[in-house]
Amino acid sequence: MASYNVLTVAGSDSGGGAGIQADLKTFSALGVYGASVLTALTAQNTRGVAAVHAVPADFVAAQLDAVFSDIRVDAVKIGMLATADIVAAVAERLRHWQPAVVVLDPVMVSKGGAPLLAPEAEAAIRAHLLPLADIVTPNLGEAAALLGVPVAADEAAMLAQAEALLALGARRVLIKGGALAGASDSPDWLVGASSGRVRLDGARAPHGYTHGTGCTLSAALAALYPLRGDWSATARDAKAYLNAALAAADRIEVGGGIHPVHHFHAYW
C-alpha cells in the first residue's frame, strides 16, 4: 500500500480546533503523513482570537524549502497566510518547487469574526495564488471578498461566483454554502472544467459546533486527492468526512464558545 505525504501551510490555533492543528488531525484521521509550515501564531480559543503574530515571510520560505528539499510532497493545503509578504513568499516557493496538487483555502476571518488576513493580502491572493491552485475553497464571504461583489444570496449566485473565480485562474472552485441565508441544508458546489458542476449536500449542525470546518474540509481534500485521483470523488468523500466530524462534535467537550468538530470521530 502506497503512503502519501501532505503539507499544510497555515496558522496555528492555540485552542487546537482549526488551522495547523485541525489540518494535521485531518491528515492523520484520513491516513496520510502530515508536514507543516507555520505562517502565523494565534492566541485563540473557542471564544475568539485575542492576538495574531505573523511569522516573517523569509522564515516561511525557509520552512517550505526545508520540507520540499527532503520530503516528497504529494499535495499542499494552504490556509491562513496573514500578510501580503507571506502570500508572495509562498507563491514564489511553490512556483519553484512545483507541487503536484495545491488546495487553497483563502482564510480571511475566524469563526468568531476576527480578521486573519490583511486587506492588502486579498489582492496578493488573487494575483499570485489563485493561478497556482488546483482547487480553491472559499466560503460565501471569502468568495465575495476575492471578487469584490456582494455575498451570494442563493445557489445560482454561488455558481456564478465560482465561475468568476475560475476566470481569475483557479482550475476548480469548491464554494461553501454553510452560511447561505434561508437554506435548509449546507450546500457546497464543486465547479471546474473537468468536473462540471457537482452539488455536495450536508446537514446543518444542530448544535452549532462548527469551529474548524473550513480548515478541515480543505485539509481533507488535500489528504484524499492522492488516494482518489479524481476531484469529484475527492470532494464527495471530503464532505462526507466533514459531515461525520460535525455530527460527532457534541461527543467532545472543548471550551465554552464555538466548539470544534471531532476529527477522530471514527476512532474515539
Image: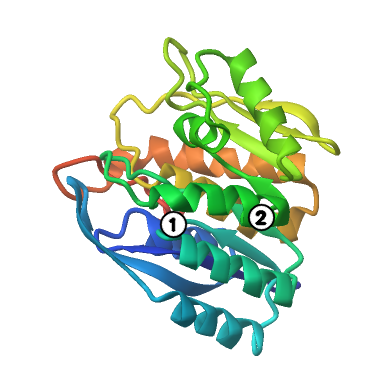
Q: Are marks 1 and 2 in contact (CB under 8 Å)?
A: no
Q: Quadrant of residue 204?
A: top left
- Give the residue furthest to the left: 256
Location of the C terminus by quadrant is bottom left
Secondary structure category for the residue under label 2: helix
* Residue at left offset 70%, top offset 46%: 234
- Judge from the rendering whether residue 15 lies leftward or rightward of residue 109; answer left or right: left
Q: Which dot marks residue 224?
A: 2
* Residue at left offset 48%, top offset 80%: 58
The x and y percentages for residue 133 are: 69, 53
> Of 223 and 173, which appears nearest the observer?
173
Q: Looking at the picture, does residue 221 appear above or below residue 35? A: above
The x and y percentages for residue 98 are: 75, 71
- Judge from the rendering whether residue 32 lies leftward or rightward of residue 186; answer left or right: right
- Judge from the rendering whether residue 39 lies leftward or rightward of residue 104; answer left or right: left
Is residue 105 visible to the viewer in this orientation of the structure? no
The x and y percentages for residue 203 are: 47, 24
Is residue 223 visible to the viewer in this orientation of the structure? yes
Q: Which residue is mark 1?
A: 80
Q: Looking at the picture, does residue 115 appear above or below residue 83? A: above
Q: Pointer 2: residues within 10 angstroms few (<14), some, or many (20+)?
A: many
Q: Which dot marks residue 28?
A: none
Q: Quadrant of residue 196?
A: top right
The residue type indicated by label 1 comes to Met
Secondary structure category for the residue under label 1: loop
* Residue at left offset 46%, top offset 44%: 214
